[in-house]
Image (cartoon, rainbow, N blue to C red):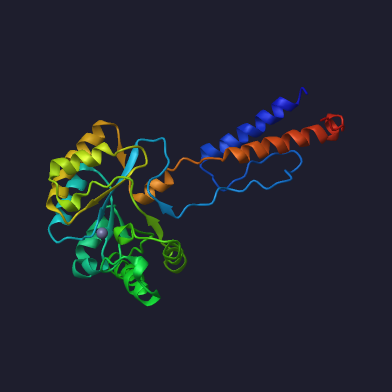
Amino acid sequence: MKLFYPVLGAAALMVAACAQDGTSSARPSISVTPPTEEILPAPVPTKFNSIKTSRPVLALTFDDGPHPELTPKLLDILRQQGVRATFFVLGSNVAKYPEIARRIVAEGHEIANHSYSHPALTKLGAARMNDEVGKTCDIIEQATGRRPLSIRPPYGALNASVEHALLQNYGLNVVLWSVDPLDWKRPGSAEVARRLVAGAQPGAILLAHDIHPGTVEAIPEVIAQLKSQGYTFATVGQLRALQDVVVPSTSIAKARASVSRATYLSPSHGGTARK
Ligand SMILES: [Zn+2]
């Protein structure tokens, strides 16, 4: 029994080290007899409402632009505040204002797909889907040199086959949101700010629209209040990289069970299995 706890402890430390290093695909390297069951990494999610993180970081996201006046105004605010955001743009607007799309990327923000003309993707056949999603990827890439990695389906309308098609055919992850201030109803900038700040938590994805004047007016107050609460801001892509790596407790239990079996059966420990 003497060696049991040190070996188990070492295995647990290795599991913990993998978690801390963020190497989610790495398996615990246990130097005794290989485990009888594979310990596989958790499947990588391709749809997000928020990110699990213990760090005080969140993502501001803006849909439906670029808008010829409001988006540049918002970009000025973000630059002044040193804040990076994610813009889910419409292909039809990027086609009209490619220079604003270029500025979004040039100033360090993430640009992402929000379809060409804002239909519910769940109601489209394959050909229309390509016009809305594939065409918008191409327009964004032509304007900015950057191909989007994420899409926010208009209205958040999604089903399993659309989600599958977005990933398989266009390589797009789905990014939804965890805070919706309903700013499109134009409740006034103070109320938009209050709702966004009230929903903030580590890993949150805040939804807003840079086509409404009150929303853009609310952003300086949102940033000031969240900064005073200790938050920093990331693009959606950056936020995903900050996700806490969680080793499922069942995997840890399996690792411990394997180590414990191996320790009991190892010839160097007497070679006698005990029950
Ligand atoms: Zn939208």
- Residue at 20% x, 36% y: name it: 224
Query: Splitting the image into 4 quarters, where does residue 263 fall?
Result: top right
**Quadrant of image for the N terminus:** top right
Q: Is residue 190 above or below residue 137?
A: above
From this viewpoint, is residue 75 visible?
A: no
**Quadrant of image for the C terminus:** top right
From this viewpoint, is residue 156 visible?
A: yes
Q: Is residue 25 left or right of residue 232?
A: right
Q: Position of residue 236 (x, y in %)?
A: 35, 50
Query: Looking at this view, is 105 or 132 the one in front?
Result: 132
Q: Is residue 39 left or right of residue 112?
A: right
Q: Quadrant of ligand 1?
A: bottom left
Q: Is residue 100 above or below residue 221?
A: below
Q: Position of residue 269 (x, y in %)?
A: 83, 29
- Residue at 37% x, 77% y: name it: 127
Q: Position of residue 65 (x, y in %)?
A: 21, 60
Query: Splitting the image into 4 quarters, where does residue 71 fall?
Result: bottom left
